[in-house]
Image (cartoon, helix red, strand yellow):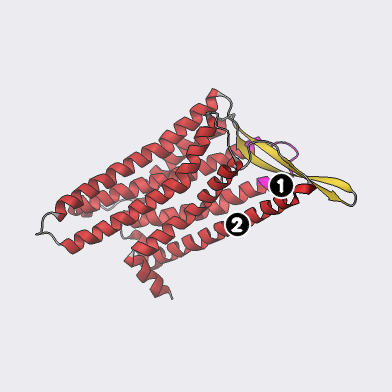
Amino acid sequence: MNTSAIISSPVQWTSSLLSQLTLFFFGCLLLLCLVIVGLVANITVCVVMFRGGRFKKHLSNFMLFHLSITDIAYRLIVVPGQWASIFYPFETKPTMFCKVAKTFLYTFNTAVFTSLVVTAFDRHQSITRPFQRLKHKPKLYRYLLAVWGYSIVCALPQMLNSGNGTHAVNFTLPAKGANSTYAVHFCVSSNTGSSQRRVALIYFVLGFLVPLLMITVAYSKISIFLWKKSRNRMINQAALKSKGKALRMLVLMVLGFVICLGVPQLYELMKSFGFKGQAAIGVLSVILYLSSSVINPVIYGLYSAEFKQGLKQGR
């Protein structure tokens, strides 16, 4: 969860605004529900893919399985850590904690898009050159090393980014005739310094735009190939329709991740260049981040007959 985007300046809420404090905790409850739903959905995908060894049938299945595992790990490692940073009573600003949390966040985000790149090019090869694909069995661990190696390299500069810090939000409430102040900490990105702007821009290009461009190229080539084949009536049209449906599923999955992960990343980039962040946009970014966990299971469940069959077998 990217809590850095929620609040960009210190705020003091008094007892006259107690409803806002209640709204804050209801918001946390909503985010917790999104985390739980995402965990259940992705665990379901993993169970179905693992049953019968479906995740090993081809590289695309393995990368979809890897996406679910990545999402589960993110919600079990990064999200609890960032929530702990909100409610733990730090005596000093946990700047280093925020840098580590943001590095983990960006690593997982890049791993998602890099996995989608591998899936796109595997689909391209399986559709345009199916016999050549059968000659070589992919070594799955090499793709994992490539995905996570590239993701770590893209995200590691966040550890050196001086623009990562914290802000405290104080809640002043009456208690037994005296005011008691409670503070929670949010990791934020300051919009000062050219180094932070460079780091943000480099990550946005390498961690988001480059993978998205590669995905677009691969799926564009597949679309052109299928369109040309569809004009040839001698080719099995049912097989082409099946491949087209699989392509639509993957394209929708990419679009979902672009919206849920790309929009918050664009917001962070704009903030680094001086855009005045609004609390509403920050909250929307958090909701989009956590909603991304539902994309893979829902779209996969709607479009994949193999996945539906696996669900029925598990009942």
Instruction: Point out the frontmost of discs 1 and 2.
Output: 2
Foreground of the two, 237 or 39: 237
The residue tagged 2 is 30
**Residue 189 visible in the snapshot:** yes
The image quarter containing residue 160 is top right
Instruction: Report the side of 294 relative to 132 (left or right).
Output: right
| Disc 2 secondary structure class | helix
Residue at 44% x, 65% y: name it.
Answer: 47
> Is 91 part of what is drawn in magenta?
yes
Q: Is residue 178 above or below residue 312?
A: above
**Residue 132 visible in the snapshot:** no
- Residue 186: x and y in percent read 65, 41
Instruction: Report the side of 14 relative to 56 (left or right).
Output: right
**Mark 2 burial class by Cα count in 10 Å: few <14, some 14-19, many 20+:** few
Q: Is residue 299 above or below residue 215?
A: below
| Disc 1 secondary structure class | loop
Foreground of the two, 210 or 22: 22
Residue at 25% x, 57% y: name it.
Answer: 244
The image quadrant where one finds the C terminus is bottom left
Which segment did they paint magenta? 85-96
- Residue 291: x and y in percent read 50, 54
The residue tagged 1 is 88
**Mark 1 burial class by Cα count in 10 Å: few <14, some 14-19, many 20+:** few
Q: Are marks 1 and 2 in contact (CB under 8 Å)?
A: no
The alpha-carbon separation of the residues under discs 1 and 2 comes to 20 Å
The image quarter containing residue 279 is top right
